[in-house]
Image (cartoon, grey):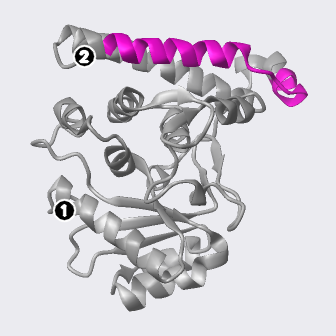
Amino acid sequence: MVARLSDKEIIEEATKIVETAQSKGVILRILGAIAIRIHSKGVEDLHKKLNRLGDEGKSFTDIDLIGYSSQWGDIRKLMERDLAFKISRQFLLLHGKDRLIYYHPEDLYHVDIFFDKLAFSHDIDFGKRGKGRLELDYPTITVTDLLLEKLQIHDINEKDIKDVIVLLKAHNLGNSDVDSVNIDYLSKILGDDWGFWMDVRENLMKTLRFAQKYRDAAILSAGDYEEIANKINSLLEILDTCPKTKKWQKRAKQGVKKKYWRDVEELYR
């Protein structure tokens, strides 16, 4: 679906849905590129300059959200009764327990809603309500989860690499989930999953190569490139040196001869 709204308008729409949910005690958080734009204060111009979709400066086509399955019924009431969004009954029957896809009343955009985890090339688990990761930030998921969301993609696209560049430019590496990349949590997740670790490592190196390309094309300044490259190299060092579980070590011995990612149909990308 082609967006008929400006970036500013679609960001406002996403934020409005989350705010309305919050007012009713329903937890929803924004995912993806929109979340990265919201969270990357002061770097909006770079995100626009990178022209992630190559579509006359538009960066977003739809809205991705995540909530808790324990509030599945409340989320349906919010979207269908309170906000008058439309849903495909066929999709609801086939996939509704894991994911909901809603269409704006005037078909301006659609909204994907996931529950508890993102299961694409690799899994990103957000836990359960009350003890989960969705409560750690607002109105988006955390910076760390946004980074993992992008870097878990086995066949990563250039638009996703651009999102990673913006996210790293706007945030420092740290030891908490407050407006920084939490290297402790990152190490815990990736030190237990060799396949996920492999794709994150490969994608960080790809991001570094694209950052060099954007620097050479004068899209990134030399200073911005140096900052991003330093953060990527720090993350690569963290991946290499973080503690590895027996599960990680056992899978590492099998190597790349055995498939280490999940194929994802375009519907679920």
| Most frequent secondary structure within the magenta stretch | helix
Say left or right for 208 vs 130.
left
Residue sitting nearer the eye, 167 or 119? 167
Q: Which residues are magenta?
A: 225-251
Viewport quadrant of the N terminus? bottom left
Q: Which mark is residue 214?
A: 2
> In this view, which residue lies farthest toward the left?
56
Question: Which residue appears at 26% of the width and 37% of the height?
Answer: 42
Q: How many marks?
A: 2
Say left or right for 256 vs 43.
right
**SS class, disc 2:** helix
Q: CA distance from mark 1 to mark 2?
A: 28 Å
Residue 14: x, y in percent? 33, 64
Task: Give the mark nearer the N terminus: 1 vs 2.
Answer: 1
Report if residue 91 is visible in the image. yes
Question: Which residue appears at 48% of the width and 41% of the height?
Answer: 179
Residue type, label 2: Tyr
**Magenta stretch: includes residue 242:** yes
Question: Which residue appears at 57% of the width and 19% of the height?
Answer: 235
Residue 223 sits above or below residue 126 on the image: above
Q: Which residue matches tag 1?
A: 9
Q: Residues within 10 Å of mark 2 (few under 14, many from 20)?
A: some
Say left or right for 216 vs 31.
left
Q: Which mark is residue 114?
A: none
